[in-house]
Structures are given as C-alpha cells and as structure tokens.
Amino acid sequence: MTVPSWLDWAQRLQSIAQTGLHYQPQPFDQQRYEMILDIAAEMMAAGSANGSTMESVKLQFNAQEGHATPKVDVRGVVFRENRILLVQEKLDNNRWTLPGGWADIGESASESVVREIWEEAGYHTRAVRLLAVYDRNKHPHPPFPFHAYKLYFLCQLTDETRYADEHNIEINGVDWFAEDALPELSVARVLPEQIARFFEHYRSPGLPTDFD
C-alpha cells in the first residue's frame, strides 16, 4: 500500500512550509511559504472524504510549530484469555480501536501507552514489548493531514480489575473480543489486518518487531 500521490504531495508541501516559517524567513519568503501552506490545505480539503474545508485544514496546519517531523501515535495491545482489549470511540461513530493516542511530551512512548490504556480502558498495565512500528502512509488508513508513525506495544495487565470512568469524554465502551468476532473498527486508528497480525504475535511470542 502506498499513500495516494495527492496526499503525499500535500503532506510534503505542508512540511516544507511549516519548517520554512519556523526559521524566520525574510518577508518575501514568508509570504511564499504561506502560499505553499494554502496550496497544501486546498489539496487536502479537495481529497478529503469527510467534507473537510480548506479553512478547517488550515486551522490544523496553523496549530503546528517548529521543524516538521512525523507525529507519533502509540497503541496498547492487551490480551486476556485469547481476547483483545478494544475501546469504543465516541468521536468516530462508536467504532472500536486499540486504546491509545498521540504520545505526550515528557513521557517515553511506553509510558504514554500505559497512561492511554488507563485513561481510556480503566486498566493498569505495563508495556512489555514493541510489536510494530508502522508508517501510517504505507497502510490503507483514511487520508490524514500529517505524516505519522504508529507504535504498537504489547502490554500486560497488572490488575484484572477495571476502574471505570463514567465521565470519559472520548470512550463509550470497553470490551474484550475474540479474533473471529471483532466489532466495526475505527480504521483511521487500526486496521483489521493489523489486529490479525497482533494475534499472530500473541500466539508466537518470538516473532520480531514489525516495521514500515
């Protein structure tokens, strides 16, 4: 799977513009970088399948600062009795995914994933192995404005008790699923073939870390 050409071009233009603006260019160059950013936002909106406007994409772009680098998404892969832990995303029409999200500044990737599992699923865990580092652009996820790496950690329960947060603003449900009974997935976050691969890792703990 390769990223669509228009998405690759838009991401690269956004990266060039963001990085160029970061280094305090001369006024003429600043204007050019801002024009490039507008072109990238226009391309992204035109290719969007969810009705994004140029203005909404530009707001996302304008929130980015510094030298542009890939974003890092961390996801926790937790098994219990041949079932995998999934959470139901309110913001994606109640589709299901592995608990996780963007890594936070000040935390290692493993610390971030353990925190995300606690916040979204209500379980205490520890990260024990890195299963995969995927380039989002090389997998058939829906288009996304930014280049991102996705890190999937195998995590173990340290406490079987679930501590439910009834006021969670992101998650509508938490459950365990067998490999042959998965719910509708939030494919922006995880793909069925990735879940299948993690079950392979579960059955064969000696498999090496996947990448790309």
Image (cartoon, grey):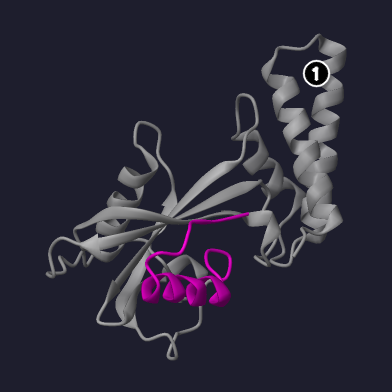
Q: Position of residue 72 (x, y in %)?
A: 51, 45
Compared to 207, does 211 lie above or below? above
Q: Residue furthest front?
A: 206
Would residue 87 be visible to someone looking at this image? Answer: no
Q: Position of residue 18 (x, y in %)?
A: 71, 29
Q: Does the magenta portion include 12? A: no
Crowd around label 1: few <14 · some 14–19 · many ≥20 (10 Å): some
Q: Quadrant of the N terminus?
A: bottom right
**Does residue 127 appear left or right of residue 12 in this picture?**
left
- Residue located at (30% from left, 73% from top): 79
Compared to 128, does 30 lie above or below? above
Q: Residue furthest top?
A: 26
- Front residue of 159/146: it is 159
- Residue located at (38% from left, 76% from top): 203
What SS does tag 1 mark? Answer: helix
Q: Position of residue 149 (x, y in %)?
A: 57, 48
Q: Looking at the rendering, which quadrant does residue 181 occupy?
A: bottom left
Q: Which residues are magenta?
A: 187-212
Q: Does the magenta portion include 198? A: yes
Tag 1 residue: 30
- Front residue of 55/49: it is 49
Would residue 149 be visible to someone looking at this image? Answer: yes
Q: Position of residue 180 (x, y in %)?
A: 45, 90
Compared to 89, does 74 lie above or below? above
Q: Quadrant of the C terminus?
A: bottom right
Q: How many marks?
A: 1
- Front residue of 64/198: it is 198
Residue type, mark 1 in image: Gln
- Residue located at (44% from left, 85% from top): 182
- Residue located at (24% from left, 62% from top): 156
